[in-house]
Amino acid sequence: MNLPNVITISRIALIPVFVVFFYVHFVGHYFIAWAIFAIAAVTDFVDGYIARKRNLVTNLGKFLDPIADKVLVLTAFIIFLTRPHIFLHNFGDFVDVIDCSAPGFGSWPMIVAGCGVSLIIAREMIVSGLRMVAASSGYVISADIIGKYKTFSQDLCIGFLVVAEGIYEIAEMYLPEWYLFGEVVNYIGLGLFVISVVLTVVSGINYVVKNLEVLAR
């Protein structure tokens, strides 16, 4: 097994570690979760670069790399939905745990977030299916620039939202003056979430339109 594949497998192995540190409760756990996610996200660029630079591209790498990317991002977005306060923070008050029966749970931010995550999942499934159909016909669908921007915006979004949770935690326990900073970081993350959803839809449509001949075979 070559180095790029080892890096890709390491990225997959980091996903459950990210989940563990996101959920465990001790001071700073969100920052550790962020660091783990950041390392995993960076390896996405590192393994591809090494594989191309050293001519180490393999079928195993082609298979594992997109799976690792999708599982990493989708895992993060799905666990965000289990913590509704990520999308429901307001200036001036702390939101720790929102019960599913609480009125705020069904408010528009959660509806938008849920629909956005659904669109992201749908896009990944459609593009993956399209690539499988193309591969069965001996045709390779390569990543386009919009898809790369999509991935970059998703990684940034997840990073900002996780860091915001860490700042909120510190503000609530020790430094209340940090709360406004947490709000700023949170809103940047939410803005990036909207951008990533838009890019997800656009890139998905672009993939389908550009490869209609594959579906017509």
Image (cartoon, grey):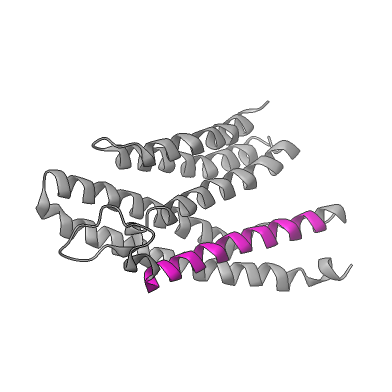
Taking depth in this image into account, of 173 and 151 the one nearest to the observer is 173
Q: Quadrant of the N terminus?
A: top right
At horizontal 45% and vertical 60% (from top left) the residue drawn is 153
Q: Position of residue 140 (x, y in %)?
A: 77, 55
- Residue 36 is drawn in which quadrant? top left
Q: Position of residue 47 (x, y in %)?
A: 57, 38
Q: Is residue 42 above or below residue 130?
A: above
Report the number of discs: 0
With 5 as the anchor, is 117 left or right in this view? left
Q: Is residue 166 magenta?
A: no
With 45 as the anchor, is 19 left or right in this view? left
Q: Position of residue 139 (x, y in %)?
A: 82, 56
Q: Is residue 131 magenta?
A: yes
Q: Give the extent of the magenta segment.
A: 107-133
At horizontal 37% and vertical 71% (from top left) the residue drawn is 107
Asked whether the viewer can see residue 81, the reply is yes
Asked whether the viewer can see residue 58, the reply is no
